[in-house]
Image (cartoon, helix red, strand yellow):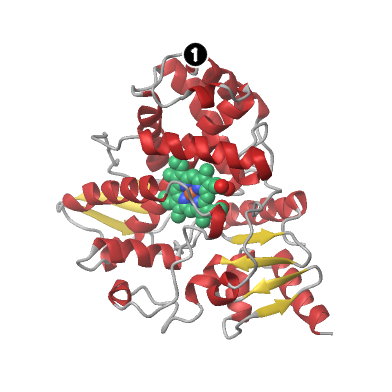
Amino acid sequence: MRKLYYSALFYGGTLLLPISPGELAWKLFSKKKGKIPLFHRDLICDTETLMSLPKSDRSLDECTTAFSPFIPLLTLNDEAWKSRRKILADILRTIKLDHFDWSLPLKKGDIYWDVYENLFRIGFQLIFHRAPTSSEFAAIYPGIVDINKIIKRQTGKADMECRWRLYHTVVELLKDDNPLFSDEFRALSEINQVSIVVEDLLTSICIQCSDLVCHLLLLSESFTENLDHCINETLRLYPLTDIWTRKGERGWIASLVQLNRSGWDNPNLFDPNRWEKHDHPPLISWGFDARGCPATKLGYNLSKAIIEKILQDKTLWIVPAANFTHTRTFPLGCQVWIGRGEKPTSWTFAGKWRTLFKQWFNSRLRLFDQQELW
Ligand code: HEM
């Protein structure tokens, strides 16, 4: 009976309501601890329960179709995963984050894709040690955008033509001498080599760091002295992943929004000072067990360096639109007005409801497409 009740509540809400499964889990079960039984799996309500599960190195969400025709590391298992994860870790150790160019346009509207393009150029430079030529940019960038548009549910179907153009251009780039790519890397199949470069590195840098930088920008008005605490607090309230699912004898599902808030005082409040104390639940936004993020250092340092550059410019103001709601996934982009001089009191952007409906529709399509919840 309990299973039926909780499953109807959670799955019904996920199908009908315009919020993500992770946000819904927190809204429905913020008072719960331990496990809630659903039809085929348990919903894990807090980090203590998550950490007490049997150790596993199985992939989390195996069903993601966002990356097609690639095979991202996070979907692999067993030996294929182990050897690729080691090669990726070696590459990440070799990447040096020195000087990089950064420019934020003075603009009124969605700046998400401006941030994304900047990060694409930084990522390309980190991997290939030079800027992309204009023809390389035209061949690669649309594919990297398409992957994120599927993940963000801004579109329902992958643009395979631009994905293949991306694939073949990276095959050409891999022919160059590059100290990042060891003999072990060169011994991998072509699709694995392209997949490491395109997904595990370039797309991850673009998506993860753009999301984090935009969250930081939107919250920067409330920042306190200690930037590390502000970044932790941003990632606590806005983890970049929505849910984790893992199969097993009895599979489970966990909402990162819920895990990061359960067990905290005033859990929904942005309060960087809470990180000064040490007796609190861990931040779960970088993952856990063997499947934790292998690029924590790069992702953290790069995003921090970018926001530092932005905050250094004391003449700049950033005003989010009055009708913009800051959520985890940027369904409406990142609607801000960035300028210098006299600061506007308020402004609104157009097209909110049309965009939200499109995003809601594409999200439902992907719930069925990926079967990630059941
Ligand atoms: C900037 C903030 C970042 C955060 C908060 C973050 C978080 C995470 C999390 C939570 C996971 C576990 C799986 C999942 O939830 O999807 C993960 C996995 C992964 N991340 Fe990150 N990440 C970040 C940046 C990056 C960057 C910059 C890269 C690449 C350079 C990267 C590469 C990966 C890869 C390849 C995996 C899959 C690991 C595996 O399955 O073994 N991440 N990340």
Q: Is residue 346 left or right of residue 281?
A: left
Q: Amino acid at mark 1?
A: Lys
- For label 1, the residue is 175
What residue is drawn where x is 49% and y is 29%?
Answer: 141
Q: Is residue 8 left or right of residue 169?
A: right
What residue is drawn where x is 30% and y is 58%?
Answer: 319
Q: Residues within 10 Å of mark 1 (few under 14, many from 20)?
A: few
Q: Is residue 248 left or right of residue 55?
A: right
Where is residue 68, by image quadrant?
Answer: top right
Vertical side of 301 occupied by 256: above or below: below
Q: Nearer the viewer, residue 200 or 179?
A: 179
Q: Nearer the viewer, residue 279 or 332?
A: 279
What residue is drawn where x is 58% and y is 69%?
Answer: 23
Find residue 336 and report its horizontal and vertical position in percent.
36, 53
Vertical side of 251 occupied by 2: above or below: below
As helix, strand or loop, the secondary structure at mark 1 comes to: loop
What residue is drawn where x is 39% and y is 57%?
Answer: 215
Q: Image quadrant for the C terminus?
A: bottom right
Residue 362 appearing in the image: yes
Q: Image quadrant for the N terminus?
A: bottom right
Where is residue 156, by image quadrant?
Answer: top right
Q: Is residue 203 left or right of residue 95?
A: right
Residue 207 appearing in the image: no
Vertical side of 163 occupied by 280: above or below: below
Find residue 184 and report its horizontal and vertical position in percent.
53, 26
